[in-house]
Amino acid sequence: MHVIFLAFKDYCIGNTFKAECGTNEIVVMSHAFYGIMKLGSCIKQTEDWAVGCSKNVIQRADRHCSGRLKRCEFLPVTIFDDLNPCNAALRTYFEADYVCRGVSNRFSNCDSSIIQLGLDETRYLASMSSFSSATCHNYKIRAAQGYTFNITLHDFFTEQRNPDDTEKERAVCSSNKRRNHVLKTTTNSVEIRLNEIKEMRFLLEITVLGCPEPNEPPENGWIRSETDGSFVTGCHGSDETWPLTCKDQRWVYPITTCKLKIYNIRVEESFLESRKGKAILGATILGCFIAFFVPFIILTILRVRMIKKEKERFENKFGIMKLPETYPGANFIVAPVGSYSRQSSGGSSHLYESTSAYQKQ
């Protein structure tokens, strides 16, 4: 924004008022009085009672000059003489001042007419009639998360509004008030659509309000966004919270540093990962093997032996002899038939097993 501040300048009868601004700047009248304000270059001497007779003619000066691009000029006596508050016989003059406001209307591509605003920044949009060539109709105003906008209409449009009144969309209409508050947004984004109205010049002032979304938590702490859009902060390891306050477009932190709580925590190596643990685990497995499998093997061996002895005892008890199924060199099979005979000879007895021999076929 380019602003030129000028000391009040006197324009005597017959003098032309001229305002000069730069490229993409419009003229905005900031002071306009007509009459006899003081003795000076235009009125060197007059009746004492006449000094101070004057009238604020800013509204008429606006209609002739404010909102024009780069420059404007007019002859004050032809514009304000019918408003002369002084005696018609007295000479009067025009006292004026103006500022140049840089506007953001110019875009080479209207599809990309996005205006990004930062902290403490103000932008202006002029009416379509302020330009001799076509400009964009729609403008998207953006700011960082957490910011809002205050939009003020200069010169003509809408009735006075409560600064806290917010709406998602509002039509702005002309009124007899020179500077009117239009609306205060609730978000960090707004779209403005300008209608092309002939011979009606105005200026929209867009100012950033609020604070950007906080992203710097206190040392050893954190920041959290609440459902109502507010922010709270706290310390790690604690459930206590404190609200952040937005003041002069900056966040005020109730705490800046969190004290760390020190706990005596002994961290040991995992039992299964330590060498001692592995050795104990191996010994446990070996012990389980010895305790369960070795007795099982011993019992199995003993059981086999017991079965064998039981079989031998049974065979001895019933006189069962084990004979080979075949005799070497003999072509017959010997099969027991289970008959026995006892013979005595010489005072001794012998037990013979009767056998039957079957010639192999």
Image (tube, helix red, strand yellow):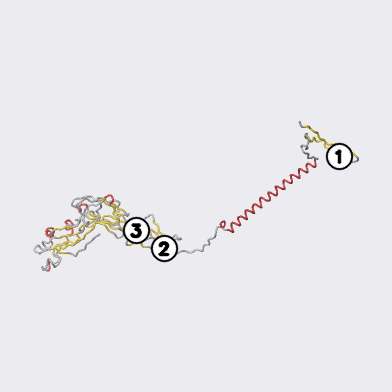
What's under tag 1, amino acid-wise?
His
Residues at discs 3 and 2 in contact (Cβ within 8 Å): no
Q: Which mark is residue 212?
A: 3
Residue at the far right in the pictured view: 346
Which quadrant: the C terminus? top right
Q: Quadrant of residue 42?
A: bottom left
Q: Which mark is residue 219?
A: 2
**Residue at point 41% right, 63% down?**
219
Residue at the far top in the pictured view: 361
Q: Residues within 10 Å of mark 3 (few under 14, many from 20)?
A: some
Circle 3 — which element?
loop
Residue at the far left in the pictured view: 89
Mark nearer the N terminus (2 vs 1): 2
What's under tag 3, amino acid-wise?
Pro
Q: Residue at label 1?
A: 350
Q: Nearer the viewer, mark 2 or mark 1?
A: 1
* In the image, residue 339 above or below residue 302: above
Rendering coords of residue 216 (x, y %):
38, 60
